[in-house]
Image: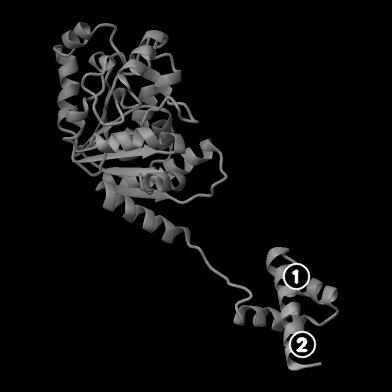
Amino acid sequence: MTNSHVRDAKVTAALTAAKLYYLQDKTMDAIAQELSTSRSSVSRLLSYARATGLVDIRVNSPFERVGMLEQSIRDRFHITAHVVPMPEIISELERVERVALTAGRLLSQFVESNMIVGVAWGSTLSVVSRALVQKDTHDTIIVQLNGAGNTQTSGVEYSSDILQRFGHAFGAQVEQFPVPTFFDNPDTREAMWQERSTKRVLRYQAKMDLAVFSLGSPAADVPSRVYVGGYLSADDYRSLREDGAIGDVATVFFRADGTWKDIRLNARATGPGLDRLRRVPRRVCIVSGEKKLASLRAAIVAGAITDVVLDESLARLLAAPA
């Protein structure tokens, strides 16, 4: 047998051993039995396969991927991204939970003594509130960003649970906002805004150091509470479609280009206007799911976000060229 035949036979044996070991997860003992050789010979064949390039072993660190995505988002949108690595195949509920877990840890770094922290309510923030890492602070105030009442419920219990968890985690005073999510009439809202009890909450909101919120989207796999909790009527949905709204922050709606002031429903909404929100030094958005992409892009365009906590799949879509 010539040298070339010997080499070809070795390459064939090494390739076979490599496929059995790396692709079929067979043990070296099982491969040795199948090839009628010894275990040490199989080990040498696998070493030969790696040395000659028949096998190329790569370690893909999720943290390296995440770092590149975070840098890309920072360079493109001038916001700080906190990307949560996770597999492609994962339920949307688990996706929310993993993002919320990261957000809970981050918020314990962001919240300090003597801060006023605005918190929105919703499906994502409910999960985040359960993932907060406890941290002792003093003279910290947690203030509700928007009312939670609708025609079916006062919303007080739901929103209060979220705020109380934030208050407990940071040893903070909690200021609730006992108004409807949407007033029936814009004039009623304007009148309510003149009441001393309402002005007190609005003054806290005006001095916020940190705002924490998610994004509402009618297309999300895990529905935003404002879209499924009885807050919007058929007329409201029609009005939002006609005005081109694609999402909301604390029940203040916006379009894809970031505009929001002339969306009719906002005249009845109780959340802070986006111009008010933009004056908050740190604005943390917690969001997951690829179907939130359009509302996330729009919120960034609107200048509503300084920090975003998001899952890896959504981050890749956000970082991709438009």
Residue 274 placed where, x, y %? 22, 29
Vertical relation: 126 (above or below) 12? above
Instruction: Answer yes or no: is residue 134 visible.
Output: no
Which residue of the protein is positioned furthest toward the bottom in this rendering?
2
Vertical relation: 188 (above or below) 228? above
Q: Amino acid at mark 2?
A: His
Residue 117 placed where, x, y %? 24, 35
> Is 200 placed left or right of 7 in the picture?
left
> Is 299 placed left or right of 127 in the picture?
left
Residue depicted at x 62% and y 73%:
55
Residue depicted at x 44% and y 48%:
312
Q: Which residue is mark 1?
A: 27
How many other residues sit within 10 Å of disc 2, few (<14), some (14-19) or many (≥20)?
few
Quarter location, residue 318: top left
Marks counted in the figure total: 2
Front residue of this view, candidates 235 and 200: 235
Residue 212 placed where, x, y %? 30, 35
Quarter location, residue 165: top left
- Determine the CA span between mark 1 and mark 2: 28 Å
Question: CB atoms at circles 1 and 2 under 8 Å apart?
Answer: no
Question: In the structure shown, which secondary structural element does the residue marked by tag 2 occupy?
Answer: helix
Quarter location, residue 11: bottom right
Front residue of this view, candidates 193 and 24: 24
Q: Amino acid at mark 1?
A: Thr
Residue depicted at x 39% and y 19%:
157
Coloring basis for residues: one colour
Q: Which residue is mark 2?
A: 5
Residue depicted at x 38% and y 16%:
155
Question: In the structure shown, which secondary structural element does the residue marked by tag 1 occupy?
Answer: loop
Vertical relation: 304 (above or below) 239? below
Quadrant (top left/top right/bottom left/bottom right) for the C terminus: top left
